[in-house]
């Protein structure tokens, strides 16, 4: 009987370890996936570097800018310029503008992607406002910079030689714990209704 109890205990321990490992992987999956995407350019995720390369080319390139806002976030969000022309390897600075259209302070966070997806790894951000919480007071407008370059290696790869334009797209979302509060702000008033 002791053998059966020992086997049951071992089985329970193995199952507990597997479940704990799965829970740990679930929590680690988002940061690990983000790192994987930044390294490989998967899903149009740009690379990240501290500075542009020393060598620039004479090859002209266009980067376009797109801005979106989650319907639950009462902000007006747009690129200051629609596109920039640059040389491959040249460091550029662009700005996006956000305005809080509500009468309350609101915090938002931006996510981004690059299209075409196959060019994501060649669009390299040096500095940007993505994944950083931005709190805007009622009516406040701020400019948010993004510094970047396009890696000259884009034309050394067979599947990206045809790319002449990249679009950088940001989408702002309300901060998670404010999402319910923001949704309530955008609902029509129920004053006068009886409970």
Image (tube, rainbow, N blue to C red):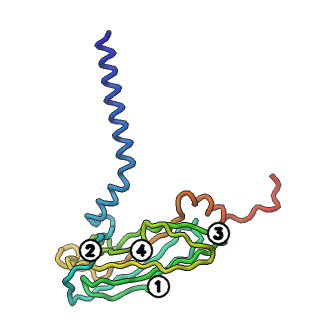
Image x and y of residue 14, in percent: 31, 29
Q: Is residue 152 above or below residue 173?
A: below
Specify whether 161 is left or right of 22.
left
Mark 1, residue position: 80
Query: The residue tagged with tag 3: helix, strand or loop?
Result: loop
- Tally the marks: 4
Q: Sequence-wise, which precedes: disc 2 or disc 4?
A: 2
| 3 or 1: mark nearer the eye | 3
The residue at which mark 2 appears reads as: 122
Instruction: Locate residue 167, reporting x and y percent.
Output: 37, 78
Image spot of residue 83 (x, y percent): 39, 86
Mark 1 secondary-structure assignment = loop
Element under label 2?
A: helix
Mark number, residue 169: 4
Mark 4 or mark 3: which comes first in sequence? 3
Nearer the N terminus, badge 4 or badge 1?
A: 1
Q: Nearer the viewer, mark 2 or mark 3?
A: 3
Residue at 24 percent of width and 77 percent of height: 151
Q: Earlier in the sequence, mark 1 or mark 2?
A: 1
Residue at 38% x, 70% y: name it: 113
Residues at circles 2 and 3 in contact by the CB criterion of under 8 Å: no
């Amino acid at each position: 009987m002791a053998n059966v109890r020992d086997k049951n205990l071992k089985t329970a321990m193995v199952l507990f370890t597997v479940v704990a490992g799965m829970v740990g992987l679930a929590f680690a999956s988002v940061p690990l996936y983000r790192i994987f995407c930044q390294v490989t350019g998967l899903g149009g995720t740009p690379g990240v570097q501290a500075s542009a390369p020393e060598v620039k080319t004479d090859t002209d390139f266009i980067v376009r800018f797109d801005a979106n806002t989650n319907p639950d976030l009462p902000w007006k969000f747009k690129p200051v310029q629609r596109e920039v022309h640059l040389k491959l390897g040249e460091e550029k600075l662009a700005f996006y503008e956000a305005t809080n259209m509500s009468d309350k302070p609101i915090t938002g966070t931006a996510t981004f992607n690059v299209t075409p997806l196959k060019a994501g790894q060649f669009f390299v951000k040096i500095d940007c406002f993505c994944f950083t919480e931005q709190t805007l007071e009622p009516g406040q407008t701020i400019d948010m910079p993004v510094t970047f370059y396009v890696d000259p290696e884009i034309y050394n790869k067979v599947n990206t030689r045809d790319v002449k334009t990249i679009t950088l797209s940001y989408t702002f979302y309300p901060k998670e714990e404010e999402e319910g509060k923001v949704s309530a702000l955008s609902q029509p008033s129920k004053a006068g209704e009886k409970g």
